Image (cartoon, rainbow, N blue to C red):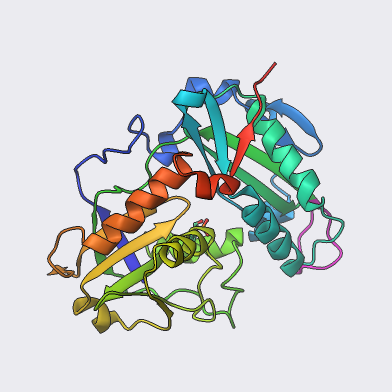
């Protein structure tokens, strides 16, 4: 797996430089409103007991959703909410959580949580279903669950103008160890060891855009799906197949994608240049289309965006 080492240049698309862990600043975080166990409450009051099963064992699933502020329309648009909502419901069921809110109900809760925060900037939303029973005992059955939704201002996570990577000696959880297609909180310890969120990758060789199949122990990526849609619309050939480490050494181009990373060209892997060592033409084309789409500049992708109504 890959360890990110972002370069130091700022991206032209980057909103105010924000780091995820410092995204809102302490004072601002206190003012944020979240959804917590059935109510909208100040984030500072959303507390769980240390006996909570999810805290004890990591038994929770989550999503990361971006919202992009569109200044011309004075409107915030959440990106591909339905995909994320469907995925978190699928993932929650993997942890034997039943009686989940419907896709429309959960979408409504997400939109309302964001609306109550009156943002006028790019944001991130994190819904999570977590095992809320206070209990010792490693299991998935006979446990209650609850939902929280946190949202906060959010800029670039990784440099979208290019990054340099190293191969990590830590291996990603295989599906036999932990469902790889699930965003399961406990599984992120594996990624913390890799110092990476193991974002999904695309490699370009001889004009063909290649990405691994979801059966290669990767997440069923929302951004990956969006990029495949753009590539298809642009008439670019896409191949879904496994990619070896050494194939990256001989690739013409490579980029990472994900809700957090957005699209980041990989300029170097293990101190070796990828292709020319610069952002390649196909990466640039896909990246530009992607950022135009998420910022609402392309009517063809307008259905990806959910407008957040004005707050009261
Ligand atoms: C492990 C992992 N893979 C891939 C992704 C790609 O994200 P998305 O499916 O939201 O595009 C993420 C980020 O959410 C991730 O955590």
29, above or below 283, in the image: above
Q: Main secondary structure of the magenta part?
A: loop
Which residue occupies the foreground of this view, 234 or 8?
A: 234
Q: Which residues are magenta?
A: 134-145
Residue at x 47%, y 66% (from the top left corner): 190
Residue 211 vs residue 53: left or right?
A: left
Q: Position of residue 240 (x, y in %)?
A: 45, 79
> In terms of depth relative to the viewer, which is nearer, 30 or 227?
227
- Quarter-of-image position of residue 251: bottom left
Residue 154, above or below 131 = above
At 44% from the left and 33% from the top, the residue drawn is 23
Image quarter of the C terminus: top right
Which residue is drawn at the image coordinates 73% and 50% (left, top)? 52
Instruction: Give x and y (percent) for residue 138.
Output: 73, 68
- In the image, is residue 137 part of the stretch drawn in magenta? yes
6 or 185: nearer the eye? 6
Is residue 132 visible to the viewer in this orientation of the structure? Answer: no
Left or right for 39, reference 58: right
Q: Is residue 187 in view from this perspective? A: yes
Q: How many marks?
A: 0
- Which residue occupies the extreme top position in the image? 312
Relative side of 265 to 85, left or right: left
89 displayed left or right of 83: right
245 within the magenta span: no
Quadrant for residue 117, please give it.
top right
**Residue 222's spot in the image, x, y percent?**
54, 59
Residue at coordinates 70% horizontally, 42% vertically from top-left? 148
The quarter of the image holding the N terminus is: bottom left
């Amino acid at each position: 797996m890959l360890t990110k080492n972002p370069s130091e240049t700022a991206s032209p698309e980057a909103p105010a430089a924000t780091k995820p862990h410092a995204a809102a600043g302490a004072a601002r975080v206190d003012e944020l409103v979240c959804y917590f166990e059935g109510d909208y409450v100040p984030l500072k009051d959303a507390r769980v007991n240390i006996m909570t099963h999810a805290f004890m064992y990591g038994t929770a699933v989550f999503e990361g959703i971006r919202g992009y502020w569109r200044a011309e329309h004075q409107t915030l648009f959440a990106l591909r909410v339905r995909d994320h909502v469907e995925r978190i419901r699928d993932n929650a069921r993997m942890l034997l959580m039943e009686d989940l809110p419907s896709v429309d109900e959960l979408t409504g809760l997400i939109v309302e949580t964001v609306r109550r925060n009156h943002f006028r900037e790019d944001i991130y939303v994190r819904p999570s279903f977590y095992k809320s029973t206070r209990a010792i005992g490693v299991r998935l059955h006979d446990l209650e669950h609850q939902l929280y939704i946190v949202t906060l201002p959010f800029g670039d996570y990784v440099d979208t103008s290019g990054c340099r990577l190293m191969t990590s000696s830590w291996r990603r959880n295989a599906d036999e160890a932990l469902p790889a297609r699930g965003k399961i909180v406990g599984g992120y310890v594996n990624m913390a060891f890799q110092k990476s969120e193991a974002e999904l990758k695309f490699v370009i060789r001889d004009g063909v855009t290649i990405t691994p199949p979801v059966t290669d122990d990767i997440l069923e990526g929302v951004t990956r799906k969006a990029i495949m849609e753009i590539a298809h619309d642009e008439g670019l050939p896409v191949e879904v197949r496994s990619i070896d480490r050494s194939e990256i050494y001989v690739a013409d181009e490579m980029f990472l994608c994900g809700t957090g990373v957005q699209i980041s060209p990989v300029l170097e892997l293990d101190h070796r240049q990828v292709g020319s060592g610069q952002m390649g033409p196909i990466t640039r084309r896909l990246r530009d289309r992607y950022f135009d789409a998420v910022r609402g500049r392309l009517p063809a992708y307008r259905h990806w965006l959910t407008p957040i109504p004005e707050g009261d």
